[in-house]
């Protein structure tokens, strides 16, 4: 948490952190099964990609599109998609809804930094539970789940879907189906 506070103070700290193997640290801790560690890592990623008032941040694009030999291409985006898709039902984990809410928020933020975000969400393959990302997210909003989903998460998902379909005709058709 202290690192999040320090990164809020200066863009130089963000750059130094990323130069000193920050990406590898983030990826290792995003796989954590401890909710506190995961929430703090999600907060750190939010802080790192936050834009300065004076200039736009390139850190968001770097993190979204970084290709790492250990984790592959777009690994942060893939992990966020998995967190949203499985939500609190990740095997051997017990996460609160705040993890899902923060992951949806980060995906929304990454859409502004990288076009790969939308493409990965729309081309996600069926995984655990037999659903791809789009099916999993829409099923969270299904009328049968009314009362089971947090209203904040519901609003965040609707906003995410709105961002996904904006300016993309083929995505509108996919979401509409």
Image: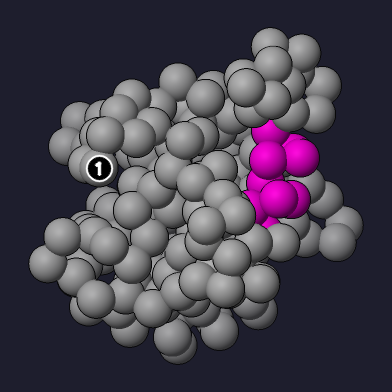
Identify which residue is drawn at 69% across, 33% down.
164
Q: Residue at x 71, y 50 (%)?
A: 158
Would you say residue 130 is visible in this rendering?
yes
| In the foreground, 144 or 164 | 144
Q: Is residue 154 left or right of residue 39?
A: right
Q: Residue furthest front?
A: 144
Task: Say whether residue 120 is magenta.
Answer: no
Q: Is residue 62 left or right of residue 95?
A: right
Where is residue 73? Give x, y as percent.
34, 28
Q: Residue at x 50, y 34 (%)?
A: 134
Question: Which of 106 and 140 lies nearest the eye of the viewer?
Answer: 140
* Residue 98: x %, y % from top left: 48, 75
Question: Is residue 152 placed above or below 145 in the rendered structure?
Answer: below
As rendered, which of 55 and 51 lies closer to the eye?
Answer: 51
Question: Would you name the residue on which mark 1 appears?
Answer: 129
Percent position of residue 131, x then y: 34, 35
Q: Residue furthest bottom?
A: 2
Question: What residue span does the magenta drawing correspond to?
Answer: 156-164
Seen as rendered, the residue at the extreme top is 170
Q: Is residue 59 visible?
A: no
Q: Quadrant of residue 149?
A: bottom right
Residue 41: horizontal and vertical position, in percent? Answer: 39, 69
Residue depicted at x 47% and y 35%: 135
Regarding mark 1 in the picture, which secondary structure is present there?
loop
């Amino acid at each position: 948490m202290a690192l999040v506070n320090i990164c809020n103070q200066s863009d130089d700290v963000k750059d130094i952190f990323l130069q000193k193997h920050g990406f590898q640290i983030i990826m290792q801790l995003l796989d954590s099964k401890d909710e506190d560690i995961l929430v703090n890592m999600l907060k750190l990623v939010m802080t790192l990609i936050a834009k300065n008032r004076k200039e736009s941040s390139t850190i968001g694009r770097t993190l979204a599109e970084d290709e790492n030999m250990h984790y592959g291409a777009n690994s942060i985006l893939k992990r966020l998609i998995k967190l949203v898709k499985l939500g609190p039902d990740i095997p051997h984990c017990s996460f609160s809804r705040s993890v899902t809410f923060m992951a949806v928020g980060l995906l929304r933020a990454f859409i502004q930094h990288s076009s790969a975000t939308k493409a990965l969400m729309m081309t996600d393959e069926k995984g655990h539970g037999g659903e791809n990302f789009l099916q999993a997210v829409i099923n969270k909003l299904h009328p049968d789940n009314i009362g089971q989903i947090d209203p904040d998460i519901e609003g965040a998902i609707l906003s995410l879907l709105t961002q996904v379909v904006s300016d993309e005709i083929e995505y509108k058709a996919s979401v509409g189906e």
